[in-house]
Image (cartoon, rainbow, N blue to C red):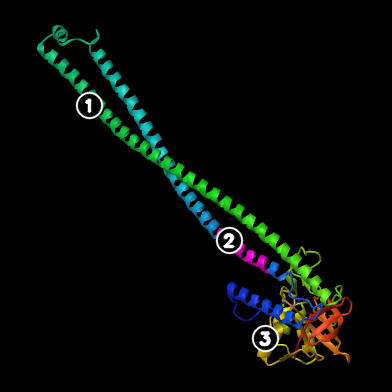
Amino acid sequence: MPKQKLKQLRLPLATTTRSVAVLVIAAVFLIGSLSVPGIVNADQYDQKIRALQEQNAEVQGQVSNLEEQAASYEEAIARLRAEISAIEGMIRDNERKQAEIQNQIDQLQTELERQRAVLGENIKAMYVGGEMSTIEMLATSKDLSEFVDKEAYRSAVQRQIQETMLKIAELQNELGDKQAQVETLLREQRAQRATLDANRAEQARLLAMNQAQQDEYSSRLKANNKKIADLRAQQAIENARLFGGGGGQLGGGGYPWGYAKCLHTGQVGGYCYNYDWSVNGSIWNWSTGGYGFRNCTDWVSWRIRSQGGHVPSGLGNAKTWDDRAPGYGFSVSTTPQAGDAAVSNSGNYGHVMYVETVQGNGSILVSDYNRAGTGKYSTAVLERVGTGIYRNPNNGVNSYLNFVHF
């Protein structure tokens, strides 16, 4: 089974889907017109795999949208936290001012009470009998002059105390106004903080819900990938049924990269997910034209090059080799020659094999990699039963092949 990294521009999904559909319809029409018993038509797993891949593309788009939303929620939460922190700082400052004003008011109240006490003590000191009326003061004075002195002193003391008390009262009122302003500001700031707290809680709720949606989509992606891996495994089994074998030899055929490790962990049913075998972190073998390690395309490209031939990059998956090769100057026919690439268009990716020999009776000995999706080396003898039609003698299954002459 093939794999190649294309160097051409990617087509839009809709264009790619239409192209695949045209290829599948054309293949069905061509094979059906041959009317040869037992021939295998288009792979039954193609449509399922394609549908799952389209679902994954849609879900991945939704995940990307959710990630953008999550970023905006996190940004909003960070902004609200900064605003709340600033408001809390102002609240602390105003609470400190409020405490200072209240302390000043308390001190003034104490001073006012003290001044009142001083006034009373002074008057009592002046008049042993307690506070005296003006007539009593006049009656007890030796003369008018003494009376005037006493009255003037008392009035002066009273005036001084009253002025002090008035100043204290005015300052109390001023501080009271300031206190009222601070209290009003505190109420507004606390209400603003409550609003910001509520907004932050809502953003956090949306972020949590967003994360739950992302988790759900991730689960769907994982489930779809599992289904795709299963379908590819079934497709590999079908490919092995067409061309025989299935066990294969690890690292066989002299292929230098036959022991490349699977890039992904958690292989499904012994199959490497997406046929991604890796060498030094790369799944593409640039020395053979950019085909995937341990894939059928890379094996055939390497095998032809090892015999002095040349396989260009850009041929794509196996099923497109016979379509693209003429554009590079190579011929395609239904008559095989040793050293050809035998191309099957069956399946989602098709399959390509190297023609080792052509026998006198028309049978061909082919070699390949990844026939059964295991990335192993295999060989098979296929009997010619018609123009471009070859049968697996082990099970009598027929397949249609085109041959690219490199």
Q: For mark 2, give the secondary structure.
A: helix
Residue that carries the numbered disc 2 in the rendered image:
62
Which residue is at 69% across, 69% downward? 47
Residue 275 falls within the magenta-colored stretch = no
Left or right: 305 as drawn, with respect to 136: right
Residue 20 occupies which quadrant of the picture?
Answer: bottom right
Which residue is at 86% across, 81% downward? 380
C-alpha span from label 1 to label 2? 78 Å
Left or right: 196 as drawn, with respect to 367: left
Q: Residues within 10 Å of mark 1 (few under 14, many from 20)?
A: few
Q: Are marks 1 and 3 in contact (CB under 8 Å)?
A: no
Residue that carries the numbered disc 1 in the rendered image:
163
1 or 3: tag closer to the N-terminus? 1
Find the magenta span and give its range.
50-66
Of tags 2 and 3, which is closer to the observer? 3
Q: Which of 348 and 56 is in front in this view?
A: 348
Question: Relative to 383, does residue 235 appear above or below in the rendering?
Answer: above
Q: Position of residue 124 (x, y in %)?
A: 26, 13
1 or 2: tag closer to the N-terminus? 2
Question: Relative to 213, does residue 109 appear above or below in the rendering?
Answer: above
Residue that carries the numbered disc 3 in the rendered image:
324
Q: Where is residue 218 in the image (x, y as percent from the top left)?
A: 65, 58
Three-letter code for the amino acid on which mark 3 is drawn: Arg
Three-letter code for the amino acid on which mark 2 is drawn: Gln
Q: Are marks 2 and 3 in contact (CB under 8 Å)?
A: no
Q: Residues within 10 Å of mark 3 (few under 14, many from 20)?
A: some
Residue 322 occupies which quadrant of the picture?
Answer: bottom right
